[in-house]
Image: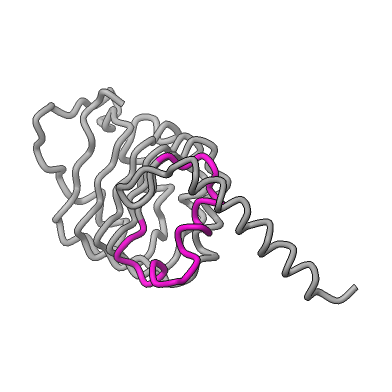
Amino acid sequence: MGKAPVDLSFKCIGSIADVLHKEPNEGLRPLKRNADNKFCSQALRLNNNLISDLAGFTLTIDSLLSDPSHLAWLDLSFNHISRIDKALTELHELRVLYLHGNHICKLSEVDKLGVLPFLHTLTLHGNAVENEKTYRDHVISVLPHLKSMDFSAVTKQERIMSQIWHKKITLSKTKRSPN
């Protein structure tokens, strides 16, 4: 990920479609564009905006990035997002996802990210979901490849305990369901 990120943070973006009408912030490294005027980057910063849903996300990144299938780093922190959109689950090369400071309330939303094989860093703190009693155990159990969660390393002990917790929950649900 040596290429400069496309930084559209602090742009008062209210919808994903608005992204295409904004110029990225200048960073330390210059952004490169291809012949189609698309950004050659694997990182996208959309933090500190007013985004509440990701409708049109796939079309937007297809228009914005030269190779959107290789998006590896996405910062959507400090927006108004309440659910994890299907578009995020289609980013199969995603490694880092920042969702802290949003409005995600349900742990089941996090389960959707389980299809991302390379996701190793995730932030969710500052969402209502972090107040759930089993928050950290749940997230680590459904995302076994995580190395860092909420800017804190996932320890071997946490991984073991989350596996035990997950087995206990699964067994409990099996006992409750009628045969």
Residue 109: x %, y % from top left: 51, 63
Instruction: Indicate left or right for 171 with 22 as reference.
Output: right
Q: Quadrant of the N terminus?
A: top left
| In this view, 132 is above or below 167 | below
Instruction: Indicate left or right for 163 with 59 as reference.
Output: right
Q: Residue at x 44, y 65 (%)?
A: 83
| In this view, 167 is above or below 128 | above
Q: Which residues are magenta?
A: 124-147
Q: Residue at x 10, y 35 (%)?
A: 27
Residue 34: x %, y % from top left: 27, 24
Q: Is residue 78 magenta?
A: no
Q: Nearer the viewer, residue 159 or 42?
A: 159
Instruction: Indicate left or right for 148 with 126 as reference.
Output: right
Which image quadrant for residue 77? bottom left
Q: Quadrant of the C terminus?
A: bottom right
Q: Nearer the viewer, residue 141 or 80?
A: 141
Instruction: Indicate left or right for 162 with 155 as reference.
Output: right
Q: Residue at x 9, y 37 (%)?
A: 26
Q: How is the image coloured?
A: one colour
Residue 108: x %, y % from top left: 55, 65
Q: Residue at x 30, y 28 (%)?
A: 36
